[in-house]
Image: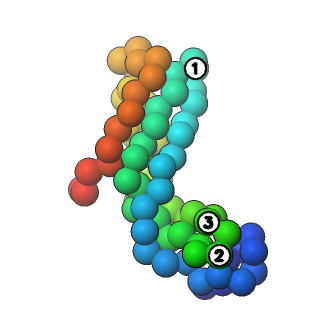
Amino acid sequence: MTCLICKVGEPEAGFTTITLERDGSIIVFKEVPAQVCPNCGETYIDSDVTSRLLTQAQDAVMKGAELEVIRLQAA
């Protein structure tokens, strides 16, 4: 797949950091598996990982976290 942003790079397996904000809570996920464009740095996250991120973020919001940093562990 060619990068949708720069139209030059071919995304490769790697990791990224994702920050989500909801209802006054900030959730930072580190070491998230992603496809990363070596040319521009754009990241692509698959649907299974996205689902895990959203579930964990919702859990953090429900427990009242204002700021939470999570290192995403392998499923």
Question: Which x, y percent locates residue 65?
Answer: 41, 18
What residue is disc 3 on? 41
Q: Say what amino acid the circle numbered 2 marks.
A: Asn
Residue 61, position in %: x, y? Answer: 44, 23
Q: Position of residue 54 (x, y in %)?
A: 46, 42
Residue 44 appears in which quarter of the rendering?
bottom right
With respect to residue 25, does 2 lie above or below? Answer: below
- Going 74% across and 70% down the picture, which residue do you hit? 5
Label pair 1/3, CB-CB below 8 angstroms: no
Q: Which residue is mark 1?
A: 23
Tell me the SS state at disc 3. Answer: loop
Q: Residue at x 75, y 74 (%)?
A: 6
Side of 31 where 2 appears, left or right = right
Query: Is 8 or 44 nearer to us in this picture?
Result: 8
Disc 3 vs disc 2: Cβ atoms closer than 8 Å? yes
Res 47 visible:
no
Farthest-out residue, right: 6
CA gap between label 1 and label 2 equals: 34 Å
Which residue corresponds to mark 2? 39
Answer left or right for 27 relative to 23: left
Q: Secondary structure at mark 1?
A: loop
Residue under the point 46% across and 17% down: 66
Task: Indicate whether 24 appears above or below 17.
Answer: above
**Which amino acid, by three-letter code, is at mark 1?**
Asp
